[in-house]
Image (cartoon, grey):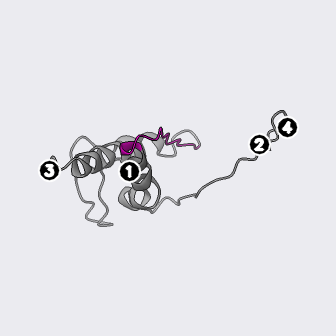
């Protein structure tokens, strides 16, 4: 709780280290992208300890690969969001 403004903050969700970025996108970010495309300002705030994977979660790799070990995609939330924007705009 912010004692100055009496605002209460909470986590939407905490993800473990074995989660696929696409699952994060589908459960948290996709709706935000759709709201932004409808004119509502949005922010995605990624918080975590140093070296916990925040940048990788946001950016991923420059080319999409599928991990042979986990079957997970390595696209970041940014590239998944841009793809979603183009799908919404029917530019695919």
Q: Is residue 60 left or right of residue 19?
A: left
In the rendered image, which quarter is residue 3 located in? Answer: top right
Question: Which of disc 2 and disc 3 is earlier in sequence?
Answer: 2
Question: Which of disc 1 and disc 2 is earlier in sequence?
Answer: 2
Give the Cα distance between marks 2 and 1. 27 Å
Main SS of the magenta part reads loop
In the rendered image, which quarter is residue 22 located in? Answer: bottom left
The stretch of residues the image draws in magenta is: 36-48
Give the secondary structure at mark 4.
Answer: loop
Pointer 4 with pointer 3, Cβ within 8 A: no
Residue 85: give x, y in percent of width and height. 28, 46
Give the Cα distance between marks 3 and 2. 42 Å
Question: Which of disc 4 and disc 1 is earlier in sequence?
Answer: 4
Give the secondary structure at mark 1.
Answer: helix
Which residue does the numbered mark 2 point to in the structure image? 7
Q: Is residue 15 left or right of residue 26?
A: right
Q: Which mark is residue 34?
A: 1
Which residue does the numbered mark 4 point to in the structure image? 3
Give the secondary structure at mark 3.
Answer: loop
Give the Cα distance between marks 1 and 4. 33 Å
Q: Which mark is residue 67?
A: none
């Amino acid at each position: 709780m912010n004692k100055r403004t009496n605002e209460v903050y909470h986590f939407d969700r905490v993800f473990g280290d074995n989660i696929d970025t696409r699952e994060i996108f589908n459960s948290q970010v996709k709706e935000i992208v759709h709201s932004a495309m409808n004119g509502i300002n949005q922010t995605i705030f990624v918080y975590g300890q140093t070296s916990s994977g925040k940048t990788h979660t946001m950016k991923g790799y420059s080319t999409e690969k599928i991990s042979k070990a986990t079957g997970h995609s390595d696209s970041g939330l940014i590239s998944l969001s841009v793809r979603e924007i183009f799908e919404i705009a029917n530019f695919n």
